Amino acid sequence: MTVWLKLAILSAWSRRLAVGLVVASLGLACALVLTVQQLRTDSRLSFSQAVSGVDLIVGPRGSATEILLYSVFQLGRPTANMSAKVLPALRDLPMVSWALPIQLGDSYQGFPVWGAEAEFFQRFQVHGQAITFKEGQAFDPNVLYQVVLGAEVARRLNHRLGDSLVVTHGSGQALDKSHDDSPFILVGILQPTGGSVDRAVVVSVASYEALHHGWGVGEFQGLRLGAFSVAGQKPSLDDLQPREYTAVFVGLNSRAQVFAARRAIEQLPGAPLTAVLPGVALDDLWRSLSLVEDTLLIIGFAVAATGMLSVVAVMLVALGARRRELSILRALGASPARIFSLLYLEAIVIGLAGLLLGFVIQQMGLYLSSPWLRESFGLSVSLGLPSGQTLLMLAALFLGVLVAAFVPALRAYRLSLADGLNPAQLY
Amino acid sequence: MTLALDLEDLHVGWAGQDELFALANLRLEKGQSLFISGSSGSGKTSLLSVLSGVLVARKGRCHVLGYDFTALAAPARDQVRGESMGIIFQQFNLLGFMSVLDNVLMPTRLFARRNEGACRLYGSAFKQAQSLLEQLGVAPQFWHQAAHQLSVGQQQRVAAARAFMGEPMLVLADEPTSALDDLHRDRFLELLASVGGQARASLVVVSHDQRLANRFDQRLVLGRLAGTSE
């Protein structure tokens, strides 16, 4: 057996350029299939765990998907806000354990600003894990202009505890630093979570209101306003009670009450509300994306099939040049069946090399791009040995190789039978 | 088995094609040499295909090395060829990407019987390979080179060494000297004869070059009509 193996290896090595190209093309195809598969799985996982520990998300009457997108992922803009009176009404409901508001709409250097209560840091979870602080602590709700940054923001903008941030209403352009009005002070930096909170600039609801009213440093509609003053007066915290919220996250006493709670919320007097079950809404959203997903996968497989075909094509062409090689083997006593298995083995080895290369390329690619993916999409990708669906994909690809390998091997079999000791053509 | 070849009323043709030729009879004793000639297209190469078991005769008696080749299945004939025969082509005999030594050792590595034969005679296959290469004038410095790096003449001699590895009972050569110049041709045939004699193998050489005929015990001319051996 080892003689044949040595023969196969040496023969392939003598054609290493062509063989190498085939392996490379198969490798790229395989990498594509695996990457698409991995991204599908990881993004589904990231997506479905983007909000945990929250039983309901309450927003103004509207599409559940929209509410989900802007409250959890800060994608899109809320078309309307809810009255702040909703919050005590929610907290009064018997099934409700806690309710935390969130205010969205502003951004700082491209990162969304969240207005939230201090309790937010204790309640909000990402991927089943609580938010923890890398440095510092949550803001004091009684003090204005304190800010907590998510891990990505702090990293990207190179902020440290105690830094001054100029957070403005609207687009958040950096301002003239000579202004001596006091800006926001960074009091806490969060550990990375892999969720959208990594990109958050979190302030207290009072600070958010202050921002909204143009208090704090900044240009507001062309008027330069001094800190703490509108018409020359310092606002009190009472003045800064929020009037509107974008959404409210709700935790219940018991999960089983979720449908009753939703009914109760949607029947509250006042402006109509929608209560979203995060899990259900995420699944719905994911399903609507499945067309894209499936298309990607189909494309991936088409590319893989192309890779297989290239293996077959190159081997078939190479066969022409190897007819003499085959007839020498015949002369030495090799049967056509033996020649079949030789070629088949060769094709399988080439195929496996291609798949392995593809796996390596995919892992490297994911490794290199994972910081960018995490930063831009909050997507955390998992590396390592394939499992589950990915393993299934690799198995499917390998099966494809096994089938594709038949073609050149069979042709070699037929040729060696027909040619005997003297091939009809010597290329 | 005293007869290396025992053919009678043999009709030969390739599948789907007209009959190439018919042979009245051909008998070759063990250890003897046979020269087959004929004009091109007369079927010399096809006869070699029959003798080597690659092609089955359409009709007639075909006993090679004591085996009835018309009765044996293809794998069995392949086995006989691998264990008991050596074949030399006109050119491109060797696997170019393998070393000279690896080429020569192929028969003993592929077939245990052949390896036994080599060990019996020389102690090891490697020793026999050495001896044959030396006899055939291929210097040791070439033994580990890739076969394609050698000249045509050298490659023919390596092919001959390979053919005689183990203890083949029959060596078939198809125009072995046609790619060589006159000087090398004579030398090669001498070597073939001497090594063949030592190995006590029966030798069958096919060639269009009648000048070679004298060296052989028997001569056969294939033509469009049935040929007989002298």
Image (spheres, coloured by chain):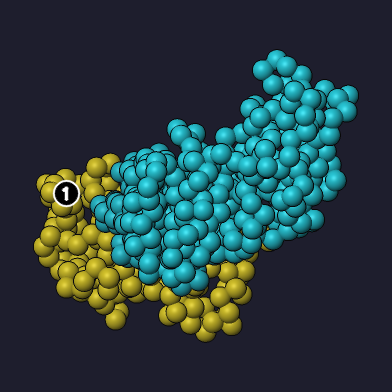
Circle 1: element type: strand
Residue at position x 60%, y 73% in the image: B126
Q: Nearest the camera: A400 or B171?
A: A400
**Residue B202 sits in quarter:** bottom left
Above or below B150: residue A179: above
Percent from the top left, x then y, of residue B173? 39, 57
Horizontal arrangement in the rendering, residue A404 relative to residue A39 (left or right): left
Q: Residue at x 61, y 33 (%)?
A: A106
Residue drawn at the location 79% of the way across and 56% of the way down: A135
x and y, in percent, of residue A235 in the image: 74, 35
The residue lying toward the viewer, choosing from B52 and A83, is A83
> Residue A401, position in %: x, y?
38, 56
Q: Chain of mark 1?
A: B
Q: Quadrant of the C terminus of chain B?
A: bottom left
- In yellow, which chain? B
Which chain is drawn using cyan?
A
Vertical side of A154 occupied by B213: above or below = below
For disc 1, the neighbor class at 10 Å (few under 14, some 14 to 19, many from 20) is some
Q: Amino acid at mark 1?
A: Leu
> Which residue is identified by label 1?
B20
Q: Is residue B135 above or below residue A323?
A: below
Residue at the extreme top: A222
The quadrant of the picture occupied by the N terminus of chain B is bottom left
Closer to us: A415 or A69: A69
